[in-house]
Amino acid sequence: MSYFKKLRKSLKSTYFFNIIQNYFHNPIKTYSDCFGEDLFVNNYFSGVRKGFYLDIGCNQPKINSLTYSLYKKGWKGLNCDISERCIKLYKFFRKDDVNLNIAVGPVEKKVNSFIFYENCTMNTVDEDFKKHTFKSVNKEPEIRVIEQKTLNQILIENNVKVIDYLNIDVEGYEINVLKGFSIKKYSPKLISIEIHDTQCPPEKNQIYQYFMRNNYTLVSIYGWTYFFEYKKNSKVHFKI
């Protein structure tokens, strides 16, 4: 690798580069570059000027964010990620939110987090998914011990009573987040979550079955992101 390529790679890995990258990231329609999932979220909550979101596995504050458009129009929320860099960026760009550098799971304890590089969307605390990420990025992760709390604990500690929108994107650890969450108590209006399954709808998948048991309806699918609405859906069609 040439000197200039090494220098460019080194600069791109810095916190300063991430600040510049997010600052100038102003797409025309969608902040979620993969499938435009935030377009569905924005339409679902069109006309709702203020609300509360939870973003578990939030990654970056603007780039690939499903909640940034809501934040821009006056919503507030709580964001969690295992990457210290990501949460540092959230504290810079989204000061009105609560931003926590923790893992979310079924019990309170210390866990290993597998950080392949800062802001990697495939960083995880799941041992099996770690192997999948390694094959994708061809790089051994840095193992960092991090505090894990249940979602219920986080909500109580931050006095959260109502959740309008919940996004869970934790690379193979999603069902463990749900195990520490009293969904019947909070009943978020809309939930998005990743389901990696070959069937559609994934009727035998435990995440899908979890939502069916708890009176949720599948209303849309963007890539591997599934959207579930509490009770009867009324907003599945929209214009871009």
Image (cartoon, rainbow, N blue to C red):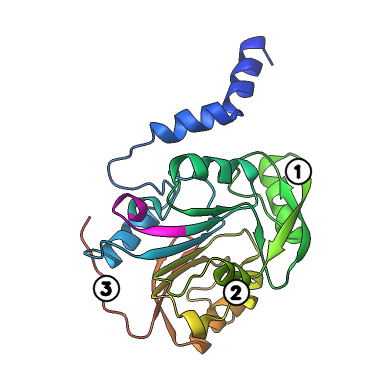
- Name the residue that disc number 1 marks: 141
Crowding around mark 1 (Cα neighbors within 10 Å: few <14, some 14 to 19, many 20+) is some
* Image quadrant in which the C terminus is located: bottom left
Name the residue located 60 percent from the left edge and 74 percent from the top edge: 152
| Residue 31 seen in the figure | yes
Region rendered in magenta: 70-77
- Magenta segment: does it hold 71? yes
Q: Which three-letter amino acid code belongs to the residue tagged 1?
A: Pro
What separation in Å lies between label 3 and label 2 (alpha carbons)? 29 Å
Q: Earlier in the sequence, mark 3 or mark 1?
A: 1
Give x and y (percent) for residue 87. 57, 46
Say above or below: 168 vs 180. above
Q: Nearer the viewer, mark 3 or mark 2?
A: 2
Mark 2 element type: helix
Q: Position of residue 37 (x, y in %)?
A: 39, 57
- Contact check, label 3 and label 1, Cβ < 8 Å: no
Label 3 to label 1: alpha-carbon separation = 41 Å
Q: Is residue 193 left or right of residue 102?
A: left
Magenta region includes residue 176 = no
Q: Amino acid at mark 3?
A: Lys
Q: Label 2, label 1: how many angstroms apart (C-alpha)?
A: 29 Å
Residue position for label 2? 152
Task: Please give the residue where the numbered disc 3 appears in the rendered image.
Answer: 235
Q: Secondary structure at mark 3?
A: loop
Give whichever of discs 2 and 1 has the lower sequence position: 1
Residue 1 image position (x, y, % from top left) = 69, 16
